[in-house]
Image (cartoon, helix red, strand yellow):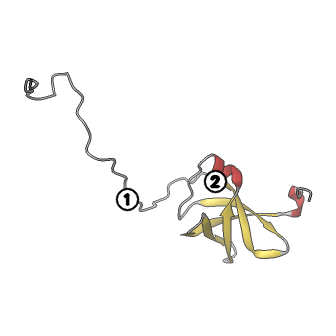
Amino acid sequence: MAKAQSDEYIEVEGKIVAVLPSTMFRVELSNGHQVLAHISGKLRKHFIKITTGDTVKMEMSPYDLDKARIVYRLRNAEVNRNAPKRSYGPRRRQSGGSNSGPTTPPKK
């Protein structure tokens, strides 16, 4: 089975509407048509994160216009993702320095 040439695909841009399980996305095209898209292997390999509101470039087969493969995430100017900020637990103070506060001697 030979690898398909890039001229056999239709390249389109769309906006991510919904994030679905198994790295699938619902994408709306500029004409209002919604397609189901999955991310390509290079995006998986390089851990490219895609969230709602991102603009992406996709490849679609001319035989099935309801599915697509996301091949590139375009840079967005300002996207309000409304995602919660991640907390990695309480921050530790660095020892030493004048702002470290009162210290107690170590117990023996």
In the figure, is residue 70 to the left or right of 108? right
Residue behind mark 2: 74
- Mark 2 vs mark 1: in front: 1
Q: Which mark is residue 84?
A: 1
Q: Which residue is drawn at 92% across and 57% down?
A: 2
Q: Give residue 5's position: percent from left, percent from top.
A: 89, 56
Find residue 18 and report its image quarter. bottom right
Which quadrant would residue 95 be assigned to in this image? Answer: top left
- Amino acid type, mark 1: Pro
Give the residue drawn at x 34%, y 47%.
88
Structural crowding at the residue carrying mark 1, measured as other residues with C-alpha within 10 Å and reported as few (<14), some (14–19) or many (≥20): few
Disc 2 marks which amino acid? Leu
Foreground residue, 104 or 29? 104
Q: Residues within 10 Å of mark 2 (few under 14, many from 20)?
A: few
Q: Which residue lies furthest to the front in this view?
A: 108
Q: Quadrant of residue 30?
A: bottom right
User: Whole-Å distance between the Cαs marked 2 and 1?
Assistant: 22 Å
| 94 lies above or below 82 | above
Q: Position of residue 41 (x, y in %)?
A: 70, 53
Under circle 2, the secondary element is loop
| Disc on the earlier residue, 2 or 1 | 2
- 34 and 80: which is toward the camera: 34
Q: Report the disc number at residue 27.
A: none
